[in-house]
Image: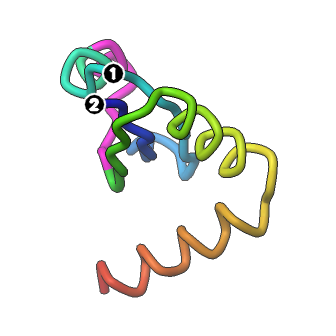
Amino acid sequence: MYYVYILKRNDRKTTYVGYTNNLRKRFRQHRGKEPELIYYEAYKDARDARMRERKLKSRGQTARRLKERLQYSLS
């Protein structure tokens, strides 16, 4: 499995988008920055996960809409 994930840093109001094949290990690597995992998606193919990550990073509107949906569902 491959994962696309979004982390929120608690010390700042910034988010980080990434992809990995081991979500738990990758989350531990981010721990020094005190992240909060706010969203992830699972994919069977690495290429699909990379493409989704690129879309979230390069297309501001895609990421913005996803973040809006997440804020609405967390409220």
- Amino acid at pointer 1: Asn
Q: How crowded is mark 2: few (under 14 residues within 10 Å), some or many (20 or more)?
A: few
Q: Which residue is drawn at 60% across and 46% down?
A: 52
Identity of the residue drawn at 41% across and 42% down: 5
Mark closer to the observer (2, 1): 2
- Of residues 61 and 47, the one drawn nearer to the viewer in this rendering: 47
Query: Residue 66's x, y, as percent?
Result: 55, 70
The dot on residue 1 is 2
Q: In this view, does 51 lie to the left or right of 34?
A: right
Q: Where is residue 33 in the image (x, y as percent from the top left)?
A: 39, 24
Q: In the image, what residue occupies the spot 27% across and 30% down?
A: 1
24 versus 75 height, above or below: above
User: Taking 63 as reference, is 74 left or right?
Assistant: left
* Mark 2 element type: loop
Q: Which amino acid does label 2 sit on?
A: Met
Q: How is this picture coloured?
A: rainbow
Q: Is residue 38 above or below residue 57?
A: below
The reply to whether the C-beta atoms of the residues labelled 2 and 1 are less than 8 Å apart is yes
**Quadrant in the picture for residue 68:** bottom right
Between discs 2 and 1, the one toward the N terminus? 2
Instruction: Say the numbered circle drawn on residue 21.
Output: 1
Start and end of the magenta stretch? 29-37
Q: Mark 1 falls on what kind of element? A: loop
Who is closer to the viewer here, 54 or 8? Answer: 54
Q: In which quarter of the image is residue 22?
A: top left
